[in-house]
Image (tube, helix red, strand yellow):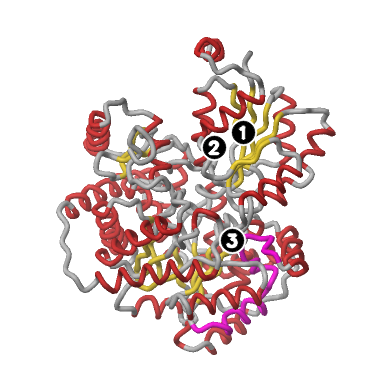
Amino acid sequence: MSATVILGVIGSDAHAVGITILEQALSAAGFEVVNLGVQSSQSEFVSAAEAHEGDAVLVSSLYGHAEQDCRGFHETIEAADLDPLTYIGGNLSVGQEEFDRTRDRFREMGFDRVFDSETKPAEAIAALKADMNIAESEAERARLTS
Amino acid sequence: MLRDTRLSGEDLSRIDEKIRADWSVEEIDFEEAVAYHDSLPRSKQFARVLEDADRPLLQPRAGVPRLDDQITLLRHLEDAGRADLLPTTIDSYTRDNEYEKAQRGLEEARESGDDTLNGFPAVNHGVEGCRKLIESVDAPIEVRHGTPDARLLAAVTFAGGFQSFEGGPISYNIPYTKEHELAETIEHWQFVDRLAGAYTERGVTINREPFGPLTGTLVPPSIAIAVGLVEGMLAATQGVRSVTLGYGQVGNLVQDIAALRALRELGEEYLPDDVTVTTVFHEWMGGFPPDEARASGVIALGAATAAIAEPDKVITKSPQEFGGVPTKEANAEGLRTTRQLIDMMREQDITLDGVEREREFVEKSARSLMDTILELGDEDVAQGVVEAFETGKLDVPFAPSDSAESAVLPARDDDGRVRILQFGDLALDPDLRDVHTDRLDRRARAENRDRSFQMVADDVDAISEGRLIGRPGGEGA
């Protein structure tokens, strides 16, 4: 199998460094990556998930407006009759909130996993593989990249 | 067609009328606004305070949605942080011209008491709100933002008493947005600069500050300098007479000092004689360590650099940079750490080996880019820079904008200086390119690996992980 991941920065946010590195890492790990780039709207994520049959949607946000930007996101995904994994990562709130509180809030909104801005690409890749039941063996990896 | 020529008075009024239709803003009376500026004390004249200083002035970043909170915040930074110059950072919805969304965020903030916006929505607060802020503090305040189309923001904040305005058509487009055409943002900023020029001609000098750090991540000095020079030249054409050129710390002491010296020298050379050129140094703009003690170390290295290079202004960071918008206490701590270092170091006569050689290299590289820009535009810098970005001859690493190729990739050399790993179509002379490649080869050999994207990824994380260079082996290696 070859899993497809939709990747982008949501809302008005223009931080491009993280997704540039994540895109490289995901591709190297064998995923098909659709990188929407910065300043992507909810509907751009949903259309891309539909058009590319995305298995996972990875949302990035660093500027603190993630909660407003993600309101109604999971309802929109459901309304499109889609059921991808959804992850979000970055600096997800304005100010110095405890990350546990932030994680709970975004989990309640429907995200399957919530990551802080210290997360390495390898961690997100391991999570994707676990959630998609992709085996981690060398043989599997070879098959994935082929 | 886009040209680097001064807008006429008619253009200025026509555009002013058009932009005020974007959001219900009261009619702005230019004469009344000039009279308001004239009524302000000398201590609030931004350009005068900056240009007359005999040591680097310190300025933090700060912006919260509610007016009362912004006043409290700025007063704290003046009192507890002893900031010389104050900021007002604008929220991201305003930067997108989404005044409706900013209004909703502001109302939510007023109801809940939480900061639901990441800055101060100045257009929504209006001229009166801005003036109340100006009158509530002692130091001059700069508008800091990231708005590609900042025409309405400029009209409101200039009338509201602000005398310094950050940004420019390239530095607030290429690093900040995806879909704005460069030619379009140049036209929009011609209005901002012309408006600043109109105030200047009436004796109210509006200081303009191109945003030097660009994408804030391992930006090669020559690229940052070329962009600043172009924006300074465009502003001068519109009548701006006070320009502060910026540069963001990369963390190698020699390279940072060299770059600041090159920036000042080239600024004097490329900008017209009637423009007063000052410089601003931004403490590290990349990823910070999560641990506040280590973050203070990064800030202190920036302060040490500033103490030696003596820019006119330093934009400070807080030890809470890692976690988003800092508390006002942490913000003041960043100011105090910076001041302690600068005051201890600036009277020492410190000479570092290699600064002159690096400065020459940075200058030659910046000239190579500037020559190309002016040649492409047949001496018209506006046309030249559009053409240069279109062809990738001028480029910014990690740029989110469709108007840039973003093919340039930087990496640190074995000494931690930022070099270029992939050039794309960047217009650097071959002998200059060879220096970058040689230096990176040397690092690759020292680390026993190939020059590759992995180096870039490692370098992006290195400072937050406690080192300068992203050596293989990870944390603590």
Magenta segment: B114-138
Disc 3 residue type?
Ala
Give the residue at x 61% y 23%. Answer: A129
Q: Residue A138: x and y, percent? A: 50, 13
- How far apart are the alpha carbons under marks 3 and 1? 29 Å
Are dots 3 and 1 in contact, CB under 8 Å?
A: no
Are dots 1 and 2 in contact, CB under 8 Å?
A: yes
Quarter of the image where one finds residue B123:
bottom right
SS majority, magenta: helix
Residue marked by disc 2: A19
Secondary structure beneath label 2: helix
Which class describes the residues within 10 Å of circle 1: few (<14), some (14-19), or many (20+)? Answer: many
- How far apart are the alpha carbons under marks 1 and 2? 7 Å
> Which of the two labelled residues, at mark 1 and mark 2, occupies the earlier sequence position?
1
Secondary structure beneath label 1: strand
Say if B374 sits above or below B239 in the image: above
Report if residue B233 is visible in the image: no
Total marks in image: 3
Residue marked by disc 3: B150
Disc 1 residue type?
Leu
Residue marked by disc 1: A7
Q: Residue A114: x and y, percent? A: 64, 41
Residue A79 left/right relative to B217: right
- How far apart are the alpha carbons under marks 2 and 3? 27 Å
Q: Callout 3: residue from which chain?
A: B
Report whether mark 1 lies on the same chain as mark 2.
yes
Residue B357 left/right relative to A27: left
Residue B207 left/right relative to A72: left
Residue B136 within the magenta-colored segment of the rendering:
yes
Give the residue at x 66% y 53%. Answer: A65
Secondary structure beneath label 3: loop
Q: Which of B259/B411 is in front?
A: B411
